[in-house]
Amino acid sequence: MLVSLKWLKDYVDIDLKAEKLAERLTMSGLEVESVKEIFPEFKGVVTAKIISVKPHPNADKLSLCEVTDGSKKYLVVCGAKNIKAGDVVPLAKVGATIPGGYTIKPSVLRGETSEGMLCSEAELAIGEDASGIMQLPKNMKPGKPLEKALDLEDTVFDISITPNRADCLSVIGIAREVAALTGKKIKMPKVNIKEISENIKSLASVKIMDAELCPRYTARMIKKVKIGPSPVWLKTRLEACGMRAINNIVDVTNFVMLEMGQPLHAFDFRYLEKNKIIVRKSKKNEEFISLDGKSRKLADETLLICDGVKPVAIGGIMGGLNSEVKEDTAIILLESAYFNPVSIRRSARKLAMPTEAAFRFERGIDPEGVVKALNRATQLIAELADGSICKNYIDEYPRKIRQVKNIKLRLEQVRKITGTQISAMEVTKILRNLGMRTTRSGKGIYLVTPPAFRVDITREIDLIEEIVRIYGFDRVPASLPNVSVGELLPNSHLKLEDNIRKIMNGMGFSEVINYSFIAPASVDSLLFPPEDERLNVVKINNPLTEEQSVMRPTIITGLLDTLKKNINNGYANLKIFELGCSFLHEKHGKLPKERNMFASLISGKKMENLWDYKSNVDFYDLKGCLENIFYALKLENITFKSDVVDTLLHPGKSCSIFLGDTPLGYMGEIHPHILENIDLKQVVYVFEINTDILEKHLKDEITYRDFSRFPAITRDVAFIVSRDMEADYIFNIISSFKEDLLENVEIFDIYEGKGIPENAKSVGLRFSYRSAERTLTDGEANIIHDKIIRGIVDVTKAKIRGEENQEE
Amino acid sequence: MIEDLQRLENNALAELQEASNQEQILLIRTKYLGRKGLLTGQLRNIAQVPDEQRALFGKRCNEIKLFLTSRIEEELNKQSQNEKENKLLKEKIDVTLPGRAIKYGRIHPITQISNEICSIFSSFGFSIVEGPEIELDYYNFEALNIPKDHPARDMQDTFYIEENIVLRTHTSPVQVRVMEKVKPPVRILSPGKVYRRDSDVSHTPMFHQIEGLLVDEGITFGDLKGILTLFLKKIFGQETKIRFRPSFFPFTEPSAEVDICCVMCRGKGCRVCGQSGWLEILGSGMVDPAVFKYVKYNSEKYTGFAFGLGVERMAMLKYGISDIRLFYENDFRFLRQF
């Protein structure tokens, strides 16, 4: 909220410099976000009295004015007609600057020298009136700088008001706070109403149909008003606080709202049919055109202010175009009411009309301020629009607005929460300065009644906050808690993720973090088949953009996106990974399924910028990393299967990953169709696995197994098998022998080409035989080895490539 | 005769000095010490030496023989060393070519800062806990004393999935979930992603938060100040000036914003701190009794404090990053700097 320092000073004496005051307010909870000096846009303009006005000898439309600034006389040529001897007007002397950057110079107009310029409101950017020279009060002394004479300089604070401090949404509210902080007294504006004999109650009536939504509605009537622009002082106040001046009636309602925090509305009484105000809820789809000229369909439960026939305002939010104050308005019905905060908030949100009035009503206005503001505004309207105030005011008050009284406050509790030894005297002094009534009801126990405008204070803890806030947070001594020793809660998931990060780093992968929300088109581009669960995306009801409107069903999308962006920036060799959630919609009303995923992507050169190694990454580079992760995490029982393949992937270069029988994820080359879809031109390998499942299988304990100290015997054999035969198939045959002495089998060579028939390949296997108890003899090893080889040949129909390859 | 011996020795040494390879040294050996060598010849002629000099002559001959033998051996060794060295020098490689290694990866700066903060609080005895990113309205708002239709909801612009399901706007719901299950004392820290409908140079619709909660008997606002001061000095340095100022959060009362003296201008006022000299870094406060009521804690017996901070903001201040969106562009020119 913007608050003028000058305006504040109308209600409380302030000795502090602006910067210091800003700091005090900030340190007591009213955060001052900025302090701005405002100056008028002119310089060197003074007040001057007109001595005489004579016609210009050479021009009909100009006149020659003799003016004085009190010490010197000036001859000024002027084109305006609204001036006469005795008027006090602004004079821009030679050397003065006026808005638009003009500097006044001595000039000759049709043979007559002009020693300055008399200015209109518009020329000085004080107001919009350009019809003639600005008229200043006749009693104003000539020779004063205009900015001082009109008091146009000010300091404006931009204060961020937290939602609990509804009472500070007004200048008086802030002034009260300043008074409490500095120990000064608050000076409320004096209201003095002169009524005519005609009684409002014989002219108009108010009926509240829903006391829950409108517990109180008050109104006054002002007759014979003359609509016109507001005086400069009122305009500058409004403008300093960021509001535009409109006319004297509307400006007064805004002024009093800013001053006292009570939103008001002025109706043109001639448009109120049957001279009635009826406050009721809207019917569904009732239509209404508000002051901003927009036609709106209202939901039911919206509070409407109606006349005897039709709605004339949306209660607490905005008036209607049909009863707006116009240039020829003569009779004003002024409304000051209390509306239910929750109802106003709901309606304002539904209608998307966060007006100044709604903002204040939904936070809770001062129930005792309703009539005060009504009278204050009535008096100002009568003064500024020359109106006559009808006798009495209407006060429909069907339901008492709840006010909290006698909150029990324990001094001991104040000390317990704050950790201070604050004295009883200081506590009561702080509360008194905040306008609270305090009575002692026992040793260290007080009954406290907050003022009506402090709608946020209802409990002991609210009082404690007030006390420590004013006492000063800086005076609370910092301490370290005296806590009981307890066991830490487990967090194995974070630990697993941290482990993965370190392992991936060592293998050259960098971590990326992508948004959890993606574009629906990103999901489409992955070409999932209709039955794929990842099509059940979680949709955001109110996304910022279409690009971020669904929650990612897989975290691969972000990795592909990262690759694309980096290729565009000239970085085509990427090794990245991400740890994060993927989301799947399950059932309406139920939280979606969140799965913690770990995904990785490689693409481009195997080693970046290497001078002697030029090949690109392939399937086995990424598989090796994944195997290394499992090895580092000591996870056994992992299998890679080619028979179940994710549709994201190239059917010939992909596999599913299993932990025992549990599917863990997938890895492989991104399907060329998808690459084409997302406009990626280089081959990409990815994997995505579920870390929730990984975490469940992590084992902490390690059991040491003794190893054999006897030598091993190795035998190399190369089998010529069909090109399609997977290595795992052969390994499964070998393990089916359950041969204890066979310590290890590994692949030492895969060969296709010269010397090998078409559609076949040679798989070179190295077998190691070892006993835990003794040195094996060649003979013993050969018996087992031959049995295994024969087994493999029987099942696979493999041919053995060159028996002579055997060696010790 | 003795003089001849001396001359012979000198000549041999001079020749050795000149020799530049093994062959020449071997030739010298043959020339002087070989069977038909010069020194051997002298010895053979010992009979012709006069009697009174013979003993001395013989002695000198032997001395010179031993000396030359050892010098020649020495020279041979030296030459063989040199030749080995020369052979190695011919194998010289360009050591300035880049090494062949897997370039180490980087951890995202958000993760790094988050881990640093978590480990500080772990050392204070806080457990690290996690919770769902998509939350029930109840946990995200209601149980934190933010009822429906309350103006405090404006403080966090929310993404909705359904009427009662939201993308969490803070990690506080995790605290409620933990308090529902665990009786005091509670000391937890909940890091994670949070979401708010906001997007500009200093806001991204997704960001990371870390929130902490400590509940026990006798916890005071002074304790809140103590712990958070200790933490901020660890992160930003012992000299960091810190201030606590009153604010409002629906789930704490009293509530405090914590500011540190601007790290850019050291309090003089600059663009980063909006000329104030201070940077808002943490929100905190004493847990509101209304929150305790939701989780059935006795607020007469237990008190506690809670705090929350934005990880991106910490990282931006610590590394001098001015645009928050960089964290989610994953540009390698950005990532590789951390």
Image (cartoon, rainbow, N blue to C red):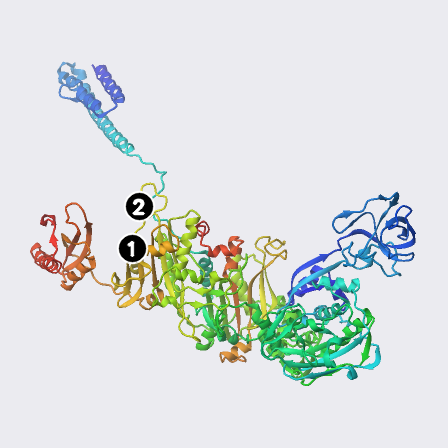
Apparent side of residue B275 relative to residue A534 in the rendered image (left or right): right
Q: Which mark is residue A615?
A: 2
Is A386 located above or below residue A17 in the figure? below
Q: Quarter-wise, where is residue A278 in the image?
A: bottom right
x and y, in percent, of residue A265 in the image: 71, 73
Kind of element beneath mark 1 = helix
Is B43 located above or below residue B301 in the figure? above
Q: For mark 1, what is the residue? A: A624
Q: In the image, what residue type sits under mark 1? A: Gly
Apparent side of residue A776 relative to residue A106 in the rendered image (left or right): left
Apparent side of residue B72 relative to residue A584 in the rendered image (left or right): left
Give whichever of A194, A401 is nearer the camera.
A194
x and y, in percent, of residue A78 in the image: 86, 51
Give whichever of A754, A791 is nearer the camera.
A754
Residue A14 in sight in this render: no
Q: Nearer the viewer, mark 1 or mark 2?
A: 2
Q: CA distance from mark 1 to mark 2?
A: 16 Å
Q: Chain of mark 1?
A: A
- Label whose residue precedes the other's in the sequence (1 or 2): 2
User: Residue drawn 90% across and 54% down?
Assistant: A50
